Image (cartoon, grey):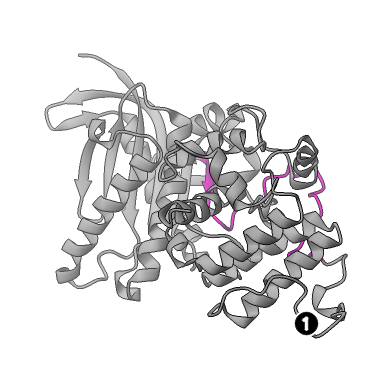
């Protein structure tokens, strides 16, 4: 008899049994699709998982060579994005909210399937009170993730892939004979990524609060400041374009950058979130993109703007999230694909090197949260994916 160490993933739909039986098949089908798309988005081959489906989820043993960072971070991020899309498009009783548990331990093959502590402990984590409470207490969250101590020490402790200890909250698990410390993460509402002993940086606001609101600056004349956006653009967005152009003319580049991000989010109904999901790209008005591009290009001699960036991104598959690092390299946002992005103030100093740096579509206000980088990547893919579809 052989003994193997495997990474185990457990997934369970919250309040599945409370739904009418006729909806169970639909929920199962949707969950299977979402899991498959999330795995693909994280670069993981779900076809190699040894899966034990249940009516309300599944328990999966992952192959020995799986990228643990891709599972602990990438898969969960992709899962959250796809759950958000599903839940916004369906009525409340068809909403899917998940508990996700992860553990790594030994197991052996038995006559009825895998046996050993790996699958048992994962099941204990999945059914634990702290994980259930995390999802119940955050009604807008799409999922809550719990990882065991070994996974936390090996994967989160590595500091790779954007994972940081401050993103996970320690909890004590006591289920039957299992007594141990595990770690909970709720995407979008977890503890900010700074260390407990480190004062978090002051977030920049959109618009920045320390600078005067553009609306309070009187217009020098009733005529438009510059090029008038094409007919049909919403008046509020037209005003945003004027604000961006005025800020650029006053050399308030970082403020204009933030306001550009806000204008695009507002145009897709995501102003309160401050960022776009990839699926929101189809809702962006081409007229707004054109006018914002003109403002950046005309005030930079053509060095900045969406068109300048668009030319640099030729050949990249913008439908694949993994291409985002290459996007950053081509636009001067990273020195290489392995570099960790600095916070916004240090990041913008790179603009002095020239190239199509602005607009960055980055939201500095979100940078105290662990999900900010993935939100930024989603924003870039939404905007430039839409531009490519529009055949700019």
Q: Quadrant of residue 239?
A: bottom right
- Left or right, residue 100 beside residue 226: left
Name the residue nearer the viewer: 300 or 53. Answer: 300
Residue 29 in the image, given as x and y percentages of width and height: 20, 57
Q: Is residue 102 within the magenta segment?
A: no
Residue 80 in the image, given as x and y percentages of width and height: 44, 54
Above or below for 63 versus 181: above
Specify the farthest residue to the top: 1
- Left or right, residue 255 beside residue 387: right
- Secondary structure of the residue carrying numbered label 1: loop
Residue 297 in the image, given as x and y percentages of width and height: 69, 54
Q: Is residue 184 within the magenta segment?
A: yes
The residue under the point 83% across, 61% down is 249
What secondary structure prevails in the magenta region? loop
Q: Residues within 10 Å of mark 1 (few under 14, many from 20)?
A: few
- Left or right, residue 291 beside residue 137: right
Residue 81 in the image, given as x and y percentages of width and height: 44, 55
Above or below for 361 versus 227: above
Name the residue nearer the viewer: 38 or 170. Answer: 38
**Residue 373 visible from this viewpoint:** no
Point out the image quarter for the N terminus.
Answer: top left
> Which region of the structure is painted magenta?
181-208
Find disc 1 in the rendering and name its residue.
Answer: 223
The residue under the point 51% across, 65% down is 286
Name the residue nearer the viewer: 50 or 218. Answer: 218
The residue under the point 48% across, 45% down is 173
């Amino acid at each position: 008899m052989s003994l193997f160490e495997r990474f185990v993933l457990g997934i369970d739909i919250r309040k599945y049994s409370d739904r009418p039986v006729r909806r169970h098949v639909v929920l199962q089908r949707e969950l299977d699709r979402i899991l498959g798309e999330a795995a693909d988005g994280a670069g993981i081959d779900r076809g190699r998982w040894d899966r034990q489906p249940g009516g309300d989820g599944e328990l999966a043993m992952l192959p020995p060579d799986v990228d643990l960072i891709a599972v602990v971070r990438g898969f969960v991020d992709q899962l959250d994005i796809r759950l958000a899309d599903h839940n916004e498009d369906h009525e409340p009783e068809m909403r899917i909210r998940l508990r996700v548990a992860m553990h790594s331990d030994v197991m052996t093959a038995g006559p009825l399937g895998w046996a050993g502590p790996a699958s048992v402990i994962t099941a204990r984590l999945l059914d634990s009170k702290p994980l259930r409470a995390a999802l119940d207490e955050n009604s807008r969250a799409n999922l809550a993730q719990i990882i065991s101590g070994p996974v936390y020490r090996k994967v989160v402790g590595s500091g790779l892939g954007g994972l940081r200890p401050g993103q996970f909250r320690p909890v004590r698990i006591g289920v039957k004979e299992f007594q141990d410390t595990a770690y909970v993460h709720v995407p979008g509402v977890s503890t900010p990524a700074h260390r407990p002993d480190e004062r978090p940086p002051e977030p920049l606001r959109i618009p920045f609060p320390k600078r005067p609101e553009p609306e309070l600056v009187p217009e020098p004349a009733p005529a438009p400041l510059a090029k008038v956006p094409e007919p049909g653009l919403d008046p509020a967005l037209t005003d945003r374009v004027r604000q961006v152009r005025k800020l650029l003319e006053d050399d308030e580049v970082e403020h204009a950058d933030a306001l550009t991000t806000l204008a695009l989010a507002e145009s897709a109904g995501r102003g309160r979130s401050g960022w776009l999901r990839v699926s929101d790209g189809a809702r962006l008005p081409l007229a707004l993109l054109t006018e914002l591009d003109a403002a950046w290009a005309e005030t930079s001699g053509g060095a900045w703007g969406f068109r300048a960036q668009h030319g640099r991104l030729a050949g990249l598959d913008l439908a694949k999230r993994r291409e985002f690092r290459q996007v950053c390299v081509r636009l001067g946002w990273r020195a290489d694909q392995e570099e960790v992005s600095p916070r916004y103030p240090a990041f913008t100093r790179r603009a002095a090197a020239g190239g199509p740096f602005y607009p960055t579509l980055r939201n500095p206000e979100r940078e105290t949260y662990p999900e900010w980088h993935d939100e930024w990547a989603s924003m870039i893919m939404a905007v430039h994916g839409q531009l490519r579809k529009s055949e700019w």
